[in-house]
């Protein structure tokens, strides 16, 4: 396994790889969700590149860029075990040298949900993912359904800008009690960790109501909100049942519909989603 920190070294290492090259972009602090993507990349490709980069441009000014959990030594040991070929760990200065001034903007889709709550977030994501694709030149890149809107935005960007690679989206990995694995779960104390199951419980309720024949999306959103409001540590940011292509809220559910939510547990903002088929 080669660990490279500069763009020049990454390009040089890329030239030695056998195609297809599978790529997993991450912000590190690995959990089973990351590992599921890396394992799939390993199973599908002769070459696997993983990047670890906490991207400052996707964090808002009052968000957790400085405190985002980091543990590169543990991450590298896990990558060694998963037999990654190359780990790309650039510095912020490598990715954003002084005078950096070009941005990738995906419109419409990014105005909703996470984009509405986190202005500029998807501009940062689209820009860094484009840069990483240009540097690593993968044949296929793997993303998690956990960040459903991110997956939708990246697919749209790749299609609109004719990027020459395949995008694979893999299912959300969960803890035994349903909580989606996330690096940010590390922020939760024991009481908050217990309360955090409310996201999965609300999504499961939506799934149950839908399975029982409820088609009124607003009714399901209200039931989800009522359930979350019973949890004293939880504050709702949004609860959505939307068209997975356009992210427009649905009135009558037309499957597949994307049920998604963002909830603060104490100071920690968590997101999750389920598709109503
Ligand atoms: P991050 O390091 O949080 O930027 O995540 C890197 C990749 O892992 C993204 O494509 C995420 O969607 C994906 N991911 C994060 N959490 C999970 C999870 N619980 N299940 C599946 N994929 C995940």
Image (tube, rainbow, N blue to C red):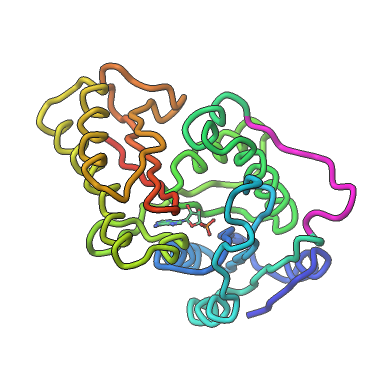
Residue furthest to the left: 212
Say which residue appears at 56% left-offset and 31% top-offset: 110
Instruction: Classify residue 125 by image quadrant.
Output: top right
- Above or below residue 32? Residue 169 is above
- Above or below residue 187? Residue 86 is below
Query: Which residues lie in the magenta part?
Result: 95-106
Based on the picture, tell me whether residue 203 belongs to the magenta stretch. no
- Above or below residue 27? Residue 211 is above
Q: Position of residue 119 (x, y in %)?
A: 61, 35
Question: In the visual, does 149 lie left or right of 134?
Answer: left
For the residue pair 136 and 52, the one nearer the viewer reads as 52
Instruction: Classify residue 239 by image quadrant.
Output: top left
* Residue 220 shows up from this direction: yes
Q: Position of residue 251 (x, y in %)?
A: 30, 17
The quarter of the rendered structure image containing the N terminus is bottom right
Residue furthest to the top: 251
Q: Position of residue 5 (x, y in %)?
A: 75, 71
Instruction: Classify residue 95 by image quadrant.
Output: bottom right
* Residue 277 shows up from this direction: no
Residue furthest to the front: 232
For the residue pair 268 and 261, the one nearer the viewer reads as 268
Q: Main secondary structure of the magenta part?
A: loop
Say which residue appears at 22% left-offset and 47% top-offset: 201
For the residue pair 203 and 246, the one nearer the viewer reads as 203
Say which residue appears at 85% left-offset and 55% top-offset: 97
The quarter of the rendered structure image containing the C terminus is top left
Say which residue appears at 22% left-offset and 60% top-offset: 177
């Amino acid at each position: 396994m080669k660990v490279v920190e500069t763009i020049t070294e990454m390009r040089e290492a890329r030239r030695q790889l056998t195609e297809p090259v599978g790529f997993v972009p991450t912000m590190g602090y690995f959990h089973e969700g990351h590992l599921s993507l890396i394992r799939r990349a390993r199973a599908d490709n002769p070459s696997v590149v993983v990047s670890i980069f906490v991207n400052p441009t996707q964090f808002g000014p009052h968000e957790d860029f400085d405190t985002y959990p980091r543990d590169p030594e543990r991450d590298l040991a896990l990558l060694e075990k998963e037999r990654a070929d190359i780990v790309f760990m650039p510095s912020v200065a490598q990715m954003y040298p002084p005078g950096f001034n070009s941005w990738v903007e995906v419109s419409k889709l990014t105005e909703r949900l996470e984009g509405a709550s986190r202005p500029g977030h998807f501009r940062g994501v689209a820009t860094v993912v484009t840069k990483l694709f240009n540097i690593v030149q993968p044949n296929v890149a793997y993303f998690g359904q956990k960040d459903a809107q991110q997956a939708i935005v990246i697919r749209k960007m790749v299609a609109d800008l004719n990027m020459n690679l395949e995008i694979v989206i893999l299912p959300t990995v969960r803890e035994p009690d349903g909580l989606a694995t996330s690096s940010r779960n590390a922020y939760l104390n024991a009481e908050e960790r217990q309360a955090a199951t409310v996201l999965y419980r609300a999504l499961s309720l939506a799934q149950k109501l839908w399975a029982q024949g409820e088609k009124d999306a607003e009714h399901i959103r209200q039931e989800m909100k009522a359930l979350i409001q019973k949890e004293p540590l939880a504050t709702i940011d949004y609860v959505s049942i939307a068209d997975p292509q356009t992210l427009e809220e649905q009135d009558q559910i037309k499957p597949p519909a994307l049920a998604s939510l963002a909830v603060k547990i104490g100071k920690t903002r968590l997101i999750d989603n389920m598709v109503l088929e």
